[in-house]
Image: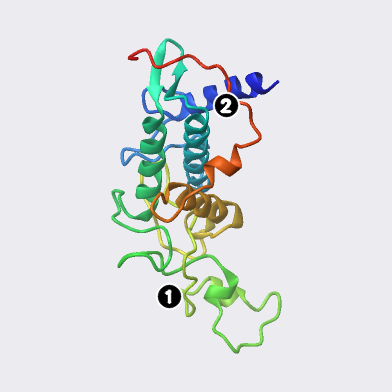
């Protein structure tokens, strides 16, 4: 059973690599796991986390890499993919913008978020927040650390509160980004790889063809 899951996961990891065309990428390098539909960053962030997690699993199994068809890839390829997606989110993109609010000098100022867009100490009814949603003013409250929905399939981005396809902050997206950042923070501890995979019996996987 474990071998079956391993093989299925290996196929998913192969599909994330730029050597294959399962998923398109923007010219700036963002993988489009939702096939060009809006709000792509939540998918890229979670894929970045899973790629690092799988590379840690292979390391814990004393396995230097895995096969995608006849081609062998070292675990570093997965970490490079993860880093490329996180870098894109944090500013290494054609817009030169950080899609995480409060990070860097340039980031979204019109986040589609009720708490960020309504001035504090205001008594507002359920429908009373609409006037702030449509306002062109910057958010009165900075929602530090929130990742927004992100660009379109052409790397374009519009900082408009009324267009949630660009500026909405979601739990599913931000949880993926936090996980990806923790997994990649080697100096700060990262994942407890030994503890995380201690109950898993290492598989007898194909060795590195270079050894």
Asked if residue 33 is positioned above or below residue 164 in the image, the reply reads above
Q: Check disc 1 and report its element: helix, strand or loop.
A: loop
Residue sitting nearer the eye, 80 or 162: 80
Residue drawn 52% across and 64% down?
Answer: 162
Discs 1, 2 touching: Cβ within 8 Å? no
Q: Is residue 175 above or below residue 67?
A: below
To which residue does mark 2 refer? 9
Viewer-side residue, 186 vs 92: 186
Which of labels 1 and 2 is toward the front?
Answer: 2
Instruction: Measuring from the top left, give residue 191's x and y in whole percent.
Output: 51, 47
Q: Could you tell me which quadrant the N terminus lies in?
A: top right
Q: Residue at x 59, y 71 (%)?
A: 114
Q: Is disc 2 placed on a helix, strand or loop?
A: helix
Q: Which mark is residue 138?
A: 1
Number of other residues with Cα within 10 Å of mark 2, as a class: few under 14, some 14 to 19, many 20 or more: some
Label placed on residue 192: none
Tag 2 or tag 1, which sits nearer the N-term? 2
User: Badge 1 local density, few (<14 within 10 Å), some, or many (20+)?
Assistant: some
């Amino acid at each position: 059973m474990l071998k079956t899951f391993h093989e299925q996961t290996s196929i998913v990891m192969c599909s994330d690599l730029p050597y294959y065309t399962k998923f398109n990428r923007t010219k700036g390098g963002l993988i489009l796991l939702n096939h060009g539909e809006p709000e792509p960053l939540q998918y890229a962030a979670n894929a970045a986390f899973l790629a690092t997690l799988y590379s840690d699993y292979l390391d814990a199994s004393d396995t230097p890499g895995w096969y995608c068809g006849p081609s062998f890839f070292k675990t570093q390829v997965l970490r490079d993919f993860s880093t490329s997606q996180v870098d894109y989110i944090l500013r290494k993109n054609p817009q030169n913008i950080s899609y995480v609010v409060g990070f860097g000098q340039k980031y979204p100022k019109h986040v589609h978020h009720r708490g960020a867009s309504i001035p504090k100490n205001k008594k507002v009814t359920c429908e009373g927040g609409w006037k702030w949603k449509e306002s062109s003013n910057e958010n009165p409250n900075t929602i530090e650390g929130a990742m927004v929905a992100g660009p379109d399939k052409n790397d374009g981005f519009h900082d408009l509160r009324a267009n949630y396809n660009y500026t909405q902050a979601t739990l599913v997206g931000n949880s993926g980004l936090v996980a990806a950042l923790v997994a990649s923070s080697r100096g700060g501890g990262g994942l407890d790889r030994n503890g995380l995979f201690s109950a898993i019996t290492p598989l007898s996987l194909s060795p590195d063809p270079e050894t």
